[in-house]
Amino acid sequence: MVCFFRKSLAGIVLVIGMFSLQAQAQDAGILVKRGQQKMATKDYKGAVQDFTEALELLPEEVNLYVNRSLAKQQLKNYAGAEEDLGFAIEIDSANADLFFKRGIVKGLMNNVAGAIEDYSISIGLNPNNANVYFNRGIEKERLKKPEAALEDYNKALALNPKYGDVYFNRGVVRAALDDKDGAMQDYSKALIYNPKNASAYFNRAIQKSDFQDFAGALSDYNNAIRLSPGFVSAWFNRGYVKTRLNNMQGALADFNKAIQLEPAADIYYSRGIVKAALKDHKGAIQDYNKVIALDSSIENVFFNRALSKMQLNDFAGAIPDLDQALQESQANSDIYYNRGVAKRNLQQYQPAASDFDKAIVLKPKNSDLYVNRGLVKIVLGDTLGAIKDFSKAIDLDPRNSGAWFNRGIQYGHLKLYSQALEDYNAVLAIRPGYADVYFNRGVIKATLKDNQGAIADYTAAIRYQPGLGAAYYNRGIERAALQSYQAALADFNRAVQLLEAKPDLYFNRALVKGNLKQYAAALADYNKALQLDPANADLLLNRGITRAILKDKAGACSDLQKAKDLGNPQADAELLKSCQ
């Protein structure tokens, strides 16, 4: 019946149909225009509604499906957007642009394979569209097929050699393929065609850093930040570059800004390292605490916090951090080494030695480990074991001055003076300005009665470390032995200024003053020395003699008697001489 009905009204329908299509087109045009206006004002739901109503009037109009698809994309209704483009393709399956647009939507839906398929169809229909190659290259990157992506980018650039975004993406791929030179060239090209591309400056800066061109990298990061002040990674990376340029304060300022923008664990960690380099270990510890609160899995954070605690002499606090660090990395010799140092400072000598043993197992060719184990062996009374460790350190690294120095000290304790002198000479060949070595060598030379040699070494020690009071004191003793009393007195005077008050210091200065016939001044020094050590028989004897010279018979006899009572063998003769 319906068929007959239609047939019977065919002529009338055609007439009415012609009139109806004109009206529909007019109405659809109004709806399309209104939908486009709503798109412009971001009323995407209203736009979808208008395009839908227009499609009811013109269901074969491809552009309406495209427009509604665009509106749905803005609403993140990607499934609906894809469906609309599918309808459009059913109507016009030879339209390359429709496949291109649907490829974009599939990409937004993470349907990478589907996107590539649509882009490939689009290319088959129209191989001269650089945008399609560009987009297909992006999707191939997402599939981790950099070589295939590179091929598409090359084709895009062959079609459009001034396509800045393609140069940028190709630079990314080349960097991933370790073609650093090619990446640099592409980022530079990208900036020619788009000088406001902050990411291109950022990526080129990374390549420059890889080439150790930190000044060039700094310039690029400056531009990236100028173009995009909220670019957190640019602030962060610029901070790192400034550390490589030894601009720690500048690095700190950049990390501060990065944290202000994004208080992330890795930024706090880097700022902590910079604060430690600036010797702000309390500030570093605060940053490491933040890191641990945000993400305790950040590598080495416990280790670095321990190092800062050790710099503040908080060795007890450092050990739990080092224990935690070892749980994360049991094959790290540096952790065992530093825990050994912490335990040594806490006088836990045997556990310290055990940690140095473990560190040596992991790094048997690290000479410093043997030096530190040797230092612990000294305290444990194993002098020969210590010498063996210092010798091993020297075998591994003949320029390890600490090994030569400490072995020299042990040779000196064993009265192996020639070996000690050889070791000190070796240290000075490596570190010519090492004051402590000159001092120690001076002690050995003084022991060997080489007074002039000792004086020369003490003088060198003072030259390199002017505040070394012990060197003035020892040089004073050697000068006094050579009867250079005035020079000796000058040395003792300086030593009194620099050193903590001790009986021997005043005693020896008093002896020199006596030899210079400055008896009253000598008496004052004996008095000071006896205040510090009132039962010293030698001091009492010499003060008694000085009092006798100053005609203080009562005081002299009192001192000499006390010296005798304390067992001084010369006191009897002086009593007979001065007190009869």
Image (cartoon, rainbow, N blue to C red):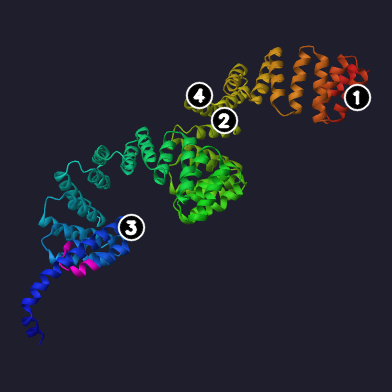
Residue numbers of the magenta segment? 53-62
Q: Is residue 483 visible?
A: no
Report, in whole angstroms, how far the alpha carbon at label 1 lies from the one at label 3. 110 Å
Q: What mark, if any, has residue 416 been given in the picture?
A: 2
Q: Is residue 460 above or below residue 189?
A: above
Report, in whole angstroms, how far the alpha carbon at label 2 lies from the one at label 3. 92 Å
As for residue 392 lying within the magenta part, the answer is no
The reply to whether discs 1 and 3 touch (Cβ–Cβ < 8 Å) is no
The reply to whether discs 2 and 3 touch (Cβ–Cβ < 8 Å) is no
Q: Where does the image place residue 382, in percent across and percent down from the top left?
A: 58, 43
Q: Between tags 2 and 1, which lies in front?
A: 1
Quadrant for the N terminus in the image = bottom left
Looking at the image, tell me whether mark 2 or mark 1 is earlier in sequence order.
2
- Residue 481 occupies quadrant: top right
Q: What mark, if any, has residue 558 been given in the picture?
A: 1
The reply to whether discs 4 and 3 touch (Cβ–Cβ < 8 Å) is no
As for residue 57 lying within the magenta part, the answer is yes
Q: Where does the image place residue 245, in percent across and percent down from the top left?
A: 42, 33
Structural crowding at the residue carrying mark 3, measured as other residues with C-alpha within 10 Å and reported as few (<14), some (14–19) or many (≥20): some
Report, in whole angstroms, how far the alpha carbon at label 4 lies from the one at label 1. 52 Å
Q: Is residue 353 visible?
A: yes
Q: Which residue is mark 4?
A: 432
Q: Residue at x 42, y 43 (%)?
A: 236
Structural crowding at the residue carrying mark 2, measured as other residues with C-alpha within 10 Å and reported as few (<14), some (14–19) or many (≥20): some
